[in-house]
Protein backbone atom coordinates (compact mmCIF):
# COMPACT_ATOMS: atom_id res chain seq x y z
CA UNK A 1 0.00 0.00 0.00
CA UNK A 2 2.96 2.34 -0.11
CA UNK A 3 1.68 4.13 -3.20
CA UNK A 4 -1.57 5.14 -1.49
CA UNK A 5 0.34 6.76 1.37
CA UNK A 6 1.25 9.83 -0.66
CA UNK A 7 -0.93 12.85 0.16
CA UNK A 8 -2.21 13.05 -3.43
CA UNK A 9 -3.22 9.39 -3.33
CA UNK A 10 -4.94 9.79 0.03
CA UNK A 11 -6.82 12.80 -1.36
CA UNK A 12 -7.88 10.73 -4.38
CA UNK A 13 -9.28 8.01 -2.12
CA UNK A 14 -11.21 10.58 -0.09
CA UNK A 15 -12.55 12.15 -3.30
CA UNK A 16 -13.75 8.71 -4.43
CA UNK A 17 -15.80 8.45 -1.22
CA UNK A 18 -17.33 11.88 -1.59
CA UNK A 19 -17.87 12.22 -5.34
CA UNK A 20 -21.48 11.96 -6.45
CA UNK A 21 -20.42 10.10 -9.58
CA UNK A 22 -18.42 7.40 -7.78
CA UNK A 23 -19.76 3.91 -8.26
CA UNK A 24 -20.35 1.51 -5.40
CA UNK A 25 -17.28 -0.45 -6.50
CA UNK A 26 -15.12 2.71 -6.35
CA UNK A 27 -16.44 3.62 -2.91
CA UNK A 28 -15.89 0.12 -1.52
CA UNK A 29 -12.36 0.06 -2.94
CA UNK A 30 -11.58 3.49 -1.46
CA UNK A 31 -13.02 2.60 1.96
CA UNK A 32 -11.09 -0.67 2.08
CA UNK A 33 -7.85 1.04 1.05
CA UNK A 34 -8.36 3.74 3.69
CA UNK A 35 -9.01 1.03 6.25
CA UNK A 36 -5.82 -0.78 5.26
CA UNK A 37 -3.73 2.40 5.35
CA UNK A 38 -5.20 3.23 8.77
CA UNK A 39 -3.68 0.09 10.25
CA UNK A 40 -0.14 1.03 9.23
CA UNK A 41 0.76 3.91 11.57
CA UNK A 42 -0.97 6.47 13.80
CA UNK A 43 0.55 9.19 11.61
CA UNK A 44 -1.20 7.82 8.54
CA UNK A 45 -4.52 7.64 10.44
CA UNK A 46 -4.05 11.30 11.35
CA UNK A 47 -3.27 12.17 7.71
CA UNK A 48 -6.43 10.39 6.59
CA UNK A 49 -8.54 12.27 9.13
CA UNK A 50 -6.94 15.57 8.08
CA UNK A 51 -7.72 14.78 4.43
CA UNK A 52 -11.43 14.43 5.23
CA UNK A 53 -11.79 10.65 5.27
CA UNK A 54 -14.26 10.65 8.18
CA UNK A 55 -16.90 12.89 6.56
CA UNK A 56 -16.49 10.93 3.34
CA UNK A 57 -17.08 7.63 5.12
CA UNK A 58 -20.08 9.03 6.99
CA UNK A 59 -21.50 10.17 3.65
CA UNK A 60 -21.13 6.60 2.40
CA UNK A 61 -23.06 5.32 5.41
CA UNK A 62 -25.89 7.78 4.81
CA UNK A 63 -26.16 7.85 1.05
CA UNK A 64 -25.27 4.33 0.13
CA UNK A 65 -27.94 2.09 -1.26
CA UNK A 66 -25.36 -0.66 -1.21
CA UNK A 67 -24.84 -2.77 1.91
CA UNK A 68 -21.31 -3.52 0.68
CA UNK A 69 -20.48 0.21 0.68
CA UNK A 70 -22.03 0.69 4.11
CA UNK A 71 -20.15 -2.26 5.62
CA UNK A 72 -16.81 -1.10 4.16
CA UNK A 73 -17.42 2.47 5.37
CA UNK A 74 -18.36 1.31 8.88
CA UNK A 75 -15.28 -0.89 9.06
CA UNK A 76 -13.03 1.98 7.95
CA UNK A 77 -14.57 4.37 10.50
CA UNK A 78 -13.88 1.87 13.25
CA UNK A 79 -10.27 1.47 12.20
CA UNK A 80 -9.75 5.24 11.93
CA UNK A 81 -11.23 5.80 15.40
CA UNK A 82 -9.30 3.00 17.10
CA UNK A 83 -7.08 4.23 19.91
CA UNK A 84 -7.58 7.95 19.32
CA UNK A 85 -9.95 10.11 21.34
CA UNK A 86 -9.47 12.90 18.79
CA UNK A 87 -10.55 10.62 15.95
CA UNK A 88 -13.48 9.29 17.99
CA UNK A 89 -14.54 12.91 18.53
CA UNK A 90 -14.14 13.61 14.80
CA UNK A 91 -16.45 10.70 13.96
CA UNK A 92 -19.11 12.12 16.26
CA UNK A 93 -18.62 15.67 14.94
CA UNK A 94 -19.17 14.44 11.38
CA UNK A 95 -22.46 12.79 12.38
CA UNK A 96 -20.89 9.35 12.36
CA UNK A 97 -22.41 8.11 15.59
CA UNK A 98 -25.95 8.72 14.33
CA UNK A 99 -25.14 7.33 10.87
CA UNK A 100 -23.74 4.16 12.46
CA UNK A 101 -26.79 3.86 14.70
CA UNK A 102 -29.04 4.16 11.65
CA UNK A 103 -27.08 1.38 9.93
CA UNK A 104 -27.66 -0.97 12.87
CA UNK A 105 -31.18 -1.37 11.51
CA UNK A 106 -29.94 -2.67 8.16
CA UNK A 107 -31.23 -6.03 6.98
CA UNK A 108 -27.66 -6.94 5.97
CA UNK A 109 -25.76 -8.97 8.55
CA UNK A 110 -22.46 -7.64 7.15
CA UNK A 111 -23.62 -4.06 7.76
CA UNK A 112 -24.94 -4.92 11.22
CA UNK A 113 -21.67 -6.57 12.26
CA UNK A 114 -19.37 -3.87 10.87
CA UNK A 115 -21.56 -1.12 12.31
CA UNK A 116 -21.71 -2.65 15.78
CA UNK A 117 -17.92 -3.14 15.83
CA UNK A 118 -17.40 0.46 14.69
CA UNK A 119 -19.76 1.75 17.38
CA UNK A 120 -17.78 -0.16 19.98
CA UNK A 121 -14.55 1.42 18.79
CA UNK A 122 -16.00 4.93 18.49
CA UNK A 123 -17.34 4.67 22.05
CA UNK A 124 -14.34 2.94 23.60
CA UNK A 125 -13.20 5.13 26.53
CA UNK A 126 -15.05 8.10 25.00
CA UNK A 127 -17.72 9.13 27.49
CA UNK A 128 -19.46 11.63 25.21
CA UNK A 129 -19.86 9.05 22.45
CA UNK A 130 -21.01 6.45 24.97
CA UNK A 131 -23.63 8.88 26.26
CA UNK A 132 -24.78 9.70 22.72
CA UNK A 133 -25.19 6.01 21.91
CA UNK A 134 -27.13 5.37 25.11
CA UNK A 135 -29.30 8.45 24.61
CA UNK A 136 -30.45 7.28 21.19
CA UNK A 137 -31.78 4.02 22.54
CA UNK A 138 -29.27 1.84 20.72
CA UNK A 139 -29.06 -0.69 23.54
CA UNK A 140 -32.30 -2.54 22.63
CA UNK A 141 -31.10 -2.78 19.04
CA UNK A 142 -27.72 -4.16 20.15
CA UNK A 143 -29.45 -6.64 22.46
CA UNK A 144 -31.58 -7.78 19.53
CA UNK A 145 -28.42 -8.24 17.44
CA UNK A 146 -26.94 -10.43 20.19
CA UNK A 147 -29.70 -12.90 19.31
CA UNK A 148 -28.80 -12.91 15.61
CA UNK A 149 -28.20 -16.22 13.87
CA UNK A 150 -24.94 -14.73 12.55
CA UNK A 151 -21.97 -15.18 14.88
CA UNK A 152 -20.32 -12.18 13.18
CA UNK A 153 -23.30 -9.98 14.11
CA UNK A 154 -23.32 -11.37 17.67
CA UNK A 155 -19.59 -10.62 18.07
CA UNK A 156 -20.04 -7.10 16.68
CA UNK A 157 -22.93 -6.40 19.05
CA UNK A 158 -20.93 -7.74 22.00
CA UNK A 159 -18.00 -5.50 21.01
CA UNK A 160 -20.31 -2.47 21.16
CA UNK A 161 -21.30 -3.20 24.75
CA UNK A 162 -20.02 -0.64 27.26
CA UNK A 163 -16.73 -1.62 28.86
CA UNK A 164 -15.64 -4.03 26.12
CA UNK A 165 -12.29 -3.90 24.31
CA UNK A 166 -12.76 -2.86 20.65
CA UNK A 167 -11.55 -5.12 17.84
Image (cartoon, grey):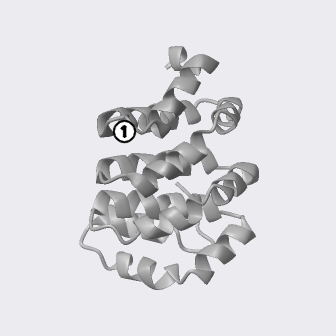
Q: Residue visible at 44% across and 60% down? A: 115
Q: Is residue 97 left or right of residue 90?
A: left
Q: Which residue is the extreme one toward the left?
A: 149
Secondary structure of the residue carrying tag 1 is helix
**In x, y percent, where is residue 88?**
68, 55
- Quadrant hosting residue 5: top right
- Quadrant hosting residue 39: top right
Which of 133 and 26 lies nearest the eye of the viewer?
A: 26
Q: Residue visible at 65% across and 60% down? A: 92
Q: Is residue 69 left or right of residue 102?
A: left
**Residue 165 visible in the shown view:** no
Question: Which residue corresponds to mark 1?
Answer: 28
Which of 148 and 28 lies nearest the eye of the viewer?
A: 28
**Residue 103 visible in the shown view:** yes
**In x, y percent, where is residue 120?**
55, 64
Q: Residue visible at 27% across and 62% down? A: 108
Amino acid sequence: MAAAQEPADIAALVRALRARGSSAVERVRAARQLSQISTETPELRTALVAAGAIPGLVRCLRAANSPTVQAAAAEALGVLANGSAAHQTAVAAAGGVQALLDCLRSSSSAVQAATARALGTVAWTHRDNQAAILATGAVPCLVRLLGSTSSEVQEGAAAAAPGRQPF
